[in-house]
Amino acid sequence: MDRSGDLGSLLTLAATLGLPCLPNLGMATTEPPKKKPDPVTSETVVIWGLRLWQVIGIFAIFVLAVIITLCCIFKCRIPRTRKEIEARYAQRQAAKTYADKLETVPPLNELTEIPGGTSHSRPLNSLPVVKEEDEMALQGN
């Protein structure tokens, strides 16, 4: 009597009745059992021969460097107290009024006289003209 035939007919009968059944119950297979993937640990090699903890460390250092660089560039320090906020506001207002007053001050060359200079203005690149008579008077002394 063929046992595998009896088992097959029992399985089909269970399926028609709606009973749960396991396929290939009791039948031997020659396939090796499927290997489960290795669990991911900190020592698992991820990329370029680096372990997982090394990749995470490099990534964390990179993110920290970007944050520090951005904070240094944009000066994004968060004030801690109301007093610091008010002091920073007063400092900005004082700097703004100083810059506004500085724009109203005339240039330095209009405010001061150059010693030994003439009262009339001449271009900065021009030299004084010396006449021949002045040269003779200077050499004769």
Image (spheres, grey):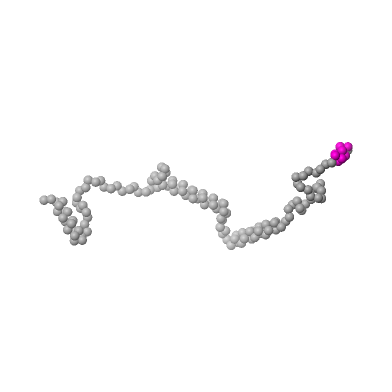
Give me the residue at 57% from left, 54% from top.
75
Q: Is residue 138 in sight in this rendering?
A: no
For residue 88, above or below residue 36? below
Q: Where, quadrant-wise, is the C terminus in this rendering?
A: top right
Give me the residue at 51% from left, 50% from top.
66
Camera-nearest residue between 25 and 11? 11
Instruction: Pinpoint residue 137: horizontal percent, then vertical percent.
Output: 88, 39
Residue 96 left/right relative to 71:
right
Camera-nearest residue between 99 and 126? 126
Give me the residue at 49% from left, 50% from top.
63
Instruction: Pinpoint residue 94: horizontal percent, then vertical percent.
Output: 66, 59
Instruction: Pinpoint residue 58: horizontal percent, then vertical percent.
Output: 46, 47
Residue range (magenta):
132-140
Camera-nearest residue between 13 and 95? 13
Give the farthest residue toward the left: 1
Camera-nearest residue between 129 and 31? 129
Q: Main secondary structure of the magenta part?
A: helix
Residue 6 left/right relative to 95:
left
Give me the residue at 77% from left, 44% from top.
126
